[in-house]
Image (spheres, rainbow, N blue to C red):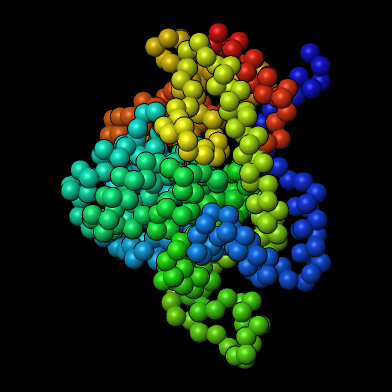
Amino acid sequence: MSDIDSMHIPFALPSIGDDEISAVVETMKSGWLTTGDKCCRFEEAFANYVGAKHALTVNSATSGLHLALEAAGVGPGDKVLTSPYTFTATAEVIRYLGADPVFIDIDPDTMNIDVELIEEAINTSVNVKAIIPVHIAGQACDMDPILDIARKYGLVVVEDAAHALPTTYKGSMVGAIGDITVYSFYVTKTITTGEGGMVVTDNDEYAGRIKTMRLHGINRDVFDRYRSTVPAWYYEVVAPGYKYNMTDISAAIGLEQLKKADSFRKRREQIACAYTHAFSGLPLKVPVISRPDDMHAWHLYIIQLDTEATTITRDKFIELMFEQGIGTSVHFIPLHLHPYWKERYGFETTSFMTAFDVYNKVVSLPIYPSMSDNDVDRVIAAVRSILG
Ligand SMILES: *Cc1c(COP(=O)(O)O)cnc(C)c1O
């Protein structure tokens, strides 16, 4: 075994190059570190990239989801529909506002919300205000029926697009579909700013409210204060807002990362194709593509072990991969199994049976642009040696 073969392949790694490093150094030397010109430029470039009217930088997708629901008017006693098959951030923001999530089980192939179950959930709940579809792994949810139901019942559609840059649905870019769409630039996501997020919308009112609430409920951001003809020291607080703004240091990284979003995605797609091709005949289900013409962001490559055709359990599989020097992960531990959600709503393991079944079979394999062909071959060889 050569040195390179024995090196650990981490589950995820950011792709940071000299462009990002120079951009950060340049920003540090400029004297303006917090929200300013770099954030404005990142917002303009991002709005243009996804085809939305407004893009607003925030310090995380969690903050962005919170601001989106606040702008949508979600408050105490309201309900928000979402899937239990997600990261807790999607649902915790509903609780921040004193509202409660109504979880809807998933489609076993895509792990996205099961659109067949949405109307029943609306009809058996009161005060449903919004729905948060989560585009798992970077494959779009079936947005047409979601939008139809949302219009029929007057729900605001807030998309959790933490995995979905860039993703399309029937020719439209995610970001130009629902009412508000939220992206994550956390370090493992498809582009990163270390920590960060973006909220996009075509709606002027939502954009205005989010802009105000992301910075203390002040009606203009700090940068504008130094640019406008109104005295520089003057500002007005119109609500008890939050401290959710992005720094220019992060935005400088984001501007460089966004330029590479397409080439990053192409590399991830190549890796996904190599995996799917190499795994045929093994006792596992490769990611199911619901609409071949959609662009898949390939943030995650999630396999489902065929637990009827192999005695290797998911946990054992992960252990054996680790022994071969390969990091993996599990997306997701369904929310209804976590103590907080389970106890608050009295869920049973079986409350969301599909989510629970899928959870017991899934493993996410490494998929990121800096993986070499040799890394990809090693992952394939390891999977084949364990399941072949
Ligand atoms: C990562 C993630 C988030 C949270 O993103 P942050 O930027 O870390 O707040 C939300 N939803 C999903 C589905 C995620 O994977």
Residue 52 picture location, percent across and down: 50, 59
Residue 66 picture location, percent across and down: 44, 59
User: Between 324 and 342, which is closer to the camera in this rendering?
Assistant: 324
Q: Quarter of the image holding residue 11?
A: top right
Check the image and report above or below for 154 versus 167.
Answer: below
Residue 259 in view (yes/no): yes
| Lateral position of residue 375 relative to residue 89, left or right | right
| Lateral position of residue 246 relative to residue 33, left or right | left
Residue 252 picture location, percent across and down: 70, 59
Residue 373 picture location, percent across and down: 71, 25
Residue at 60 percent of width and 64 percent of height: 44
Q: Quarter of the image holding residue 230?
A: bottom right
User: Dividing the image into 4 quarters, which one contains the N terminus?
Assistant: top right
User: Dividing the image into 4 quarters, which one contains the C terminus?
Assistant: top right
| Lateral position of residue 233 relative to residue 239, left or right | right
User: Between 329 and 255, which is closer to the camera in this rendering?
Assistant: 255
